Amino acid sequence: MNRGVDMNLKHRVQNFWKYFETVQSTIEQALQEGDQHELDHLLEDLNHRLATIVGTKMELEMNENGFYEMTFPSGGDKNVQFCSALLVKDAPEQLKENWILNPWRPPLSQKAMNSYIDVKGKRYGGADFKIYYKINEALKMLDIEVYCEALKDMEEDYRNRLVAYMLELFIGELELEARINSITIIDTPSDEENVCLLPNFYEDICDIIIDEEWSEYHDPTTIYMAYKLDEKLPSETLRKDMKMIITTNPQLQEELLNQEYQSCKDMKERGAEYGYLFYEVLYEDEKEALLRQQLEKEINKLFYDMSLARTIGGAIGIHYSYIDVAVFDIDGFKIALEKLNEKLSFKIYYRSFLEN
């Protein structure tokens, strides 16, 4: 049997939960008793194990309703989000009876309500942050200004990170990614009429989504972005014939277009890989786009249910159509692809982005 660092991500996830079950009762007792020293010791061990699985540190707490809660904050990192989503999906069913498992930071958590910053002997909480917002109708997002007295004399990079963190705590990673287009920190209060305190901002966002009839998102890993590419230089080479890219991982696509592969290398270290399925174009543009979209949906359902891979968008090319994937068990994935090809009238091929 392979050692942990050689295992694919699917098996690393399975092993993590097997280990967690051996310390679960100790963790629950520490949370019940508020034993922070014991909790820190347990978290150090768990986070060491998670380093080669998710790439972030878990947070543990007991919420006001008596449920244990586990969160994997991603800071918007798609590699972390895809891995933590798999981790939560494959958690033991019995664990979910008494635990709330958050693959990314949710809005208005207990942590948010208990978060403060101390500046020059004065304590500031969420209610000390004012949010001024304008609706960007074209993008269906919000442009916001943030005011808090504590931010005035802070170093710019630090206060930018602090504001992003406070927003993440109070509105959650999903809405921060899906709804906030721009953030400007201001040194004096604004006269913008749309204003609320940070603890009320999430509710305002929810109201805006309803009033403006914006699309609802339930998962930051399913927020798609589309890019139209220059068609002046058509090529028969794989990935060089693309006319349009649709993706849930813009950072990865930007790296690939610049022939950079850091995200791919990071995933490889976690026992996973980014790659793409491709097949020869079968129809004209609109019909081909519908086929590719339907195939992506069906492949995701088939492969993700087995924790082998998930689709993350793709592209339409002049000669080929592409479905991009994050693969969590490469051997199982290739076997499943062979079986899928037996049922199709055309053949789908696979290649890792690191092979390009």
Image: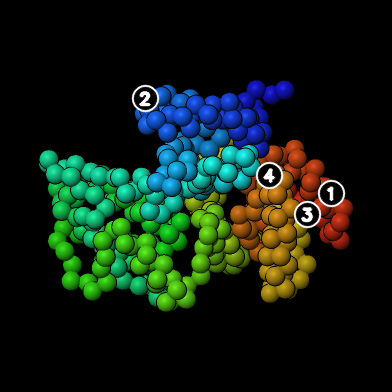
**Which residue is denoted by mark 3 in the rendering?**
348
The quadrant where residue 355 appears: top right
Q: Earlier in the sequence, mark 4 or mark 1?
A: 4
Q: Amino acid at mark 3?
A: Ile
Checking the image for residue 225, the label placed there is: none
Query: Dot 1 corresponds to which residue?
Result: 339
Question: Across the whole image, how many numbered discs are drawn on residues?
Answer: 4
On the image, the x and y values in percent for residue 339 come to 84, 49
**Precedes in sequence: disc 2 or disc 3:** 2
Q: At 75% from the left edge and 38% from the top edge, which residue is drawn?
A: 331
- Identify the residue position indicated by label 4 in the image: 307
Give whichever of 163, 65 is nearer the camera: 65
Q: Secondary structure at mark 1?
A: helix
Label located before the other in sequence (1 or 3)? 1
State left or right for residue 157 relative to residue 268: left
Q: Which residue extends farthest left? A: 120
60 over 198 or under it: above or below: above
Q: Residue 29: where, in percent of width, then height? A: 46, 29
The part of the image, by quadrant, that contains residue 343 is bottom right
Sequence-wise first label, 3 or 4: 4
Q: Quadrant of residue 158?
A: top left
Foreground tag (3 vs 4): 4
